[in-house]
Amino acid sequence: MTAKTRFLREQTLSGANKVMRAPLPSHWSTADLPYSLPERKALGLKKIMEEMPLFIGEEELIVGTRTLFKPNPGNEDGHDRYEYGLQSGVPYVTQEEIALFGSDQSWTNKTHYTPDFSILLEKGVGGILADVEQRKQDPTLTQRQREFLSSVHIAYTGLQTLILRYGDYAEELAGKASGVEKDRLSQIGAVCRKISSQPAETFRESVQLLWFGHLGTILESFEFINYGRLDVILGKYLKDTPLDEAQQLLECLLLKMYDQVDLHTTYLNKYAAQLVVTLGGVLENGENGVNQVTMLFLDAIDNVRLPEPEFNLRIHSKNPPEFLERATQLTISGCNFISYYNDDLFLESMEKAGIPAEIARQYGFDLCQDMNIPGKSDFFVAAWISLAFDLMEFLKKTRHFNSFEELLDGFKKECVQNIRSAVEGFSTAQEHLFKFRDERFEEYFADIREKGLPIDWSGRSPMCPLPYLSGLFHGPIENAVDMVYESYPVKEKGAILGTATEAVNSLAAIKKVVYDDKRYTLDQVITACEQNYHGEGQEILRNYLWNAPKWGNDDQYVDGIAVDLLEFCLRETSKYKTFSGGQLLGGIHQPHPVTTGEGLMATPEGRFSGTPVAVTLTPENGTMKNGPTAALRSASKLNPDLIQWNFCIMVNYFASVFRGNDGAAVFQTLLKGYFAQGGLQHQPNVLDVEQLKQAQLQPERYKDLIVRLWGVSAHFVDLSRELQDELIARFSY
């Protein structure tokens, strides 16, 4: 770590720039201006970019910081905190529109997106503006199309203004400085002035323009707008830049990313990393995608060591061995924000799902391990099936089956209905929204009145256009249609199987205790779950259930049930297309183990009501009896061809396992073996459990201790005691 990085890291952790945060003026509004709704949204964004207080920190090389926020009163410390949260932008929806739509959903924005920042770097702000102007020359455009294009132009004029403001400010500060400081500020000014209109040419210009591009998404949208394949994007600009200089710039970029962490955590309590950088894999042409910037990023990670952003690594057979070697060194040293993906198998599964190879090879990730084609897709959740919730509802309805096979067959039929209902609900909402897109307004509002459909479908609403983000996607400008209406080329959507571990373990426990051993009836098991195992004699019953075979131990008794049920559901989801014609892609995912568990009744594997669930297909706490390798072998039994979207298995490792000179080699061997067996993804957590307990007692000594929660990571001492205890419980094997 250089002295500059050390200083900037200390500044970031101390919140030095937060002194510049100010409340968004309450009188700011564009709602009453004589423009269309998307233009008013863009004008609100432009207003922020034009007047937001500027901040250039001491020693900074990359500049740009959000400083305007809506006050959030009532914090635990009794003080207002300016945060980026819901409804924090400039109001732009009229009261008449609120009355027309029946509610104000303007705060709901698109999330879980990965823009293609190469559009901005290659074209420059000026190029995007020119594209918009050229498209506006088409005489066949409708009024709404012209209004959308105008909104994009307004948004990027705002970005141009913001960049120029930073250039002017840097030059103003340079005029008051001398020596090295004067040179630093003068360079910032020159870079900003150039990239305010022109494409990036140097590595420094590319990093700075990329950051301004992402800052724009922060200002316009809610959370989860991810970075994509930054090594591929930035690699072409490295050229003659000295490697030490390039690494310094990447370290500055990582610190800027982390500096905005509390802007992305409104519902995760301000602690978790929620943005993802994708590295490695292969290029669009199928060749190795690891380059010098990839390796510089890994070195930068080592020096900065902060939980934001997450790094998802695509590990392909064509990648050089030093890529995995360096990454595993970071993993065993406690960088618990790195995930590994079997790039060979993921690409095969996506191609078998019908995604062309040259498109599939471009994929990146967002925080929920969702695969996205940067700037070309929205692999949004079109169906979410909570298997454990559905299983309990199914069992409560029918409390007797003659055999386990009859029970499992009945539950599969229930899953078929639930999947169909979820997909049809999403397609109906899509159809409803597309009527507005296609200017069939009367039909759109008729749907609302007659069918009771929502105005908003998880951010898909005409009340929350995204003109700025539209400029970073392929298709919206060309089609003159906002990305809210799926104007990008790849239409695939995701289908998630959640609470899978609990469902599988419950089925295995029922098979063992009720049908094989015949110790209790199914009705007795269900009754015990309804009574949370507090009824007379139910503790004994619970012990039998809890000691039944559990997922994640390489035990075919339960793994066979898992493969049977999950592959059945994945095949079922693959039968569907959405209203827009996109293929439904199967995935298995379950984040938020604590909050999800709070809403789930007691389940037949012996789990008490309200207790945490497992993260995706990770073994439940206290059930991993045969160690991490057995858990990975269980996960690798699923047919990888059926998982085309997201997947996760997180295993917690005792740090002592990897101590010594060959620790990284040990982890590499484990990972390679898992991938060779058909494993798709791995999120390792390498921790010293005694250190975690000490951190609870003396948090001031462990401020830099990073842990993985699920798809996100955090500083351990920033977590609630409930989450800390849940994490420690994962090591009870």
Image: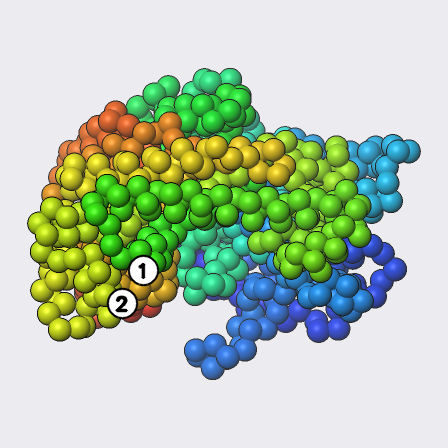
Location of residue 528 in the rendering, given as x and y in whole percent from the top left corner: 21, 66
What type is the residue that disc 2 sits on? Glu
Comparing 425 with 249, the one in front is 425
Above or below: residue 667 compared with residue 308? above
Give residue 170's position: percent from left, percent from top: 66, 52
Q: Is residue 142 left or right of residue 319?
A: right
Q: CA distance from mark 2 to mark 1?
A: 9 Å
Q: How many marks?
A: 2
Taking the spot 75% from the left edge, 34% from the top edge, the residue there is 479
Residue 541 seen: yes
Q: Amino acid at mark 1?
A: Lys
Residue with the mark numbered 2: 530
> Is 515 situated above or below 115?
below
User: Is 137 on the left or on the right of 76, as rendered?
Assistant: right
Dot 1 falls on a residue whose secondary structure is: helix
CB within 8 Å, label 2 to label 1: yes
Name the mark on residue 396: 1
- Mark positioned earlier in the residue sequence (2 or 1): 1
Residue 301 in view, yes or no? no
